[in-house]
Amino acid sequence: MTWSLTIADMLPAQRSIMWQLAKQAGVTTAVVSLPEGPDDPPVWEFETLLRLKQDFAGDGIDLQVIESAPAVLMEPIKQGTDRFDWALDRFCELIDNMGRAGISVMCHNFMAGLGWLRTSMALPDRGGALVTGYDHELMERGGPTEFGEISEGDLWERMEIFLKRVVPVAENAGVKLAVHPDDPPLSPIRGIGRILTSPDNLQRVIDLVPSPNNGITFCQGSISTMGVDMPREIRRFSGQNKVFFIHFRDVDGNPRKFRETFHDEGQTDMFETMRAWRDCGFTGPFRVDHVPTMAGEANLSPGYDVMGRLYAIGYAKGLMEGVNKM
């Protein structure tokens, strides 16, 4: 039997030409971000999620992944504000409603305040394409942020409370919690600790609240930046059935200074990672991530423009075919 991953793509929540282009490239599954800002009705309500699911189904696309919960829910939890309990209750509502709507994976993260970071969104690359990059020395020049100091210990404590409250809800709802590693995997950054900076720390999250529904998003770019043996880490987490979602991208560099690359030019042997996914029998949702901006594109969405994404999907499909023919 021919092996393949479930090819997904990050798509807008409203029907657009990207839905059609994704299907033409071989995408069968949607990943969406819930919108930020005032919500009427709130984006975590069942009706909102069901409408999203049905809109995609009407176009022959299966919505499987939410990436990720709005900041209005996650930041009070990560920062431990006075809205912690309110946000935790609303997040549980979101997970329960995802399950009832048939959306099976929540890709969440625990990067407080700053989220994923880059110091450049327009580094020149092959043929004049533009990629993103990070330089820690430049980032640290910004000094303390409005969020103040947040320690790693505080984050671990909040992570444990979060998981103990949310994991039973996810189990009942049939939703997989797939935590994303920190990007960059470096701590602290401008006074804010980061805890998901190594494979061992990802394992710690899994072990905090053992459950078939508590696992990870295996972001190849973030984990490659950690300087590890990628196929070994794929087999480590897949062997535990703890990979629920894959981000397929690559970098050149280390946590303190790196640039993103074309998928065929980074520091990772992408063929060997694809072979590891096949050997592990993983068939879940997989999306290409952080692609170069190509000629003729305005770089209005660095990492998420159209032509680089289509190129990367084709490259990934070619790797799948190659490992199947070995």
Image (cartoon, rainbow, N blue to C red):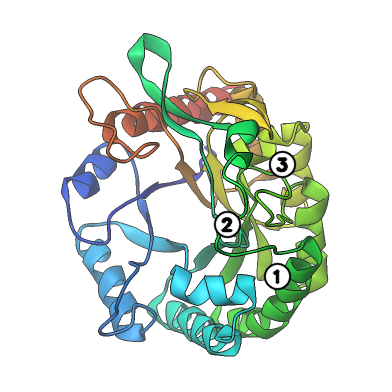
> Which of the numbered marks, if any, corresponds to residue 234?
3
> Is 135 situated left or right of 67 in this image?
right
Secondary structure, mark 2, is loop
Q: Which residue is mark 2?
A: 145
Q: Which residue is mark 1?
A: 212
How far apart are the alpha carbons under marks 1 and 3? 17 Å
Quadrant hosting residue 80:
bottom right
The x, y position of residue 122, in whole percent, is 39, 27
Three-letter amino acid code at disc 1? Answer: Pro
Three-letter amino acid code at disc 2? Answer: Thr
Which comes before the other along the chain, label 2 or label 3? 2
Looking at this view, is 90 or 66 the one in front? 90
Residue at horizontal 66 percent and vertical 26 percent from the top? 272
Residue at horizontal 29 percent and vertical 33 percent from the top? 299
Quadrant hosting residue 186:
top right
Looking at this view, is 54 or 261 the one in front? 261
Which comes before the other along the chain, label 1 or label 3? 1
